[in-house]
Image (tube, rainbow, N blue to C red):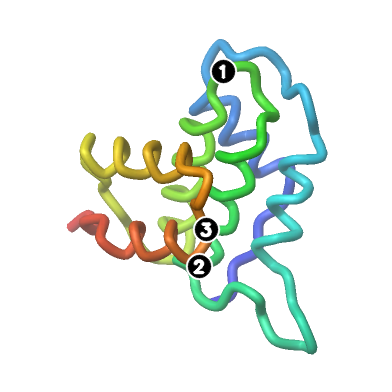
Amino acid sequence: MDLHIDVPWILQVAEIAGAHDPAPDDYGIPVAAVAAHKAELLDQPVYDGPYARAAALIHVLGRCRWLERSNMAVAAATGVMYLEASGIPVKPTRSDAIALRDLLRDPTCTTSGIATLLRTWPTAT
């Protein structure tokens, strides 16, 4: 299933996961995240599969500052909710969340690295 989300969906996640954060400073970042997760090149998806698309969302939302203080929390929540909406109910532990945070802080962070990490997260049963 190729699930594509939109900017209002990301803003709704931001309201929930970024509780008490003021309005976004830069609406271009969620617009870019939406474009990235559904990007195609020569009629082929750039990010194939739900883990890669969730990673693209997380990468853009987590590495680019667009919220005052909850970029990484909102990025992680967006990835989790995207995977769940794609039929992959994940249940990341605290150490999984810390590993994602550390990866996002690493200047060599890539979307494929995030996707690899997401695949290690336990699934909810």
Q: Residue at x 39, y 37 (%)?
A: 101
Which tag, 1 or 3, sits closer to the chain's start? 1
| Residue wearing tag 1 | 69
| Residue wearing tag 3 | 110
Q: SS at mark 3?
A: loop
Taking depth in this image into account, of 13 and 59 the one nearest to the observer is 59
C-beta proximity under 8 Å, tags 3 and 2: no
Residue 123, by quadrant, is: bottom left
Q: Residue at x 56, y 50 (%)?
A: 59
Above or below — where is 37 with respect to 60?
below
Q: SS at mark 2?
A: helix
Residue 29, by quadrant, is: top right
C-beta proximity under 8 Å, tags 1 and 3: no
Residue type for callout 1: Arg
Residue type for callout 2: Ala
Above or below — where is 98 with respect to 86?
above
Tell whether 35 sits left or right of 50. Answer: right
**Cα separation between marks 1 and 2:** 25 Å
| Residue wearing tag 2 | 52
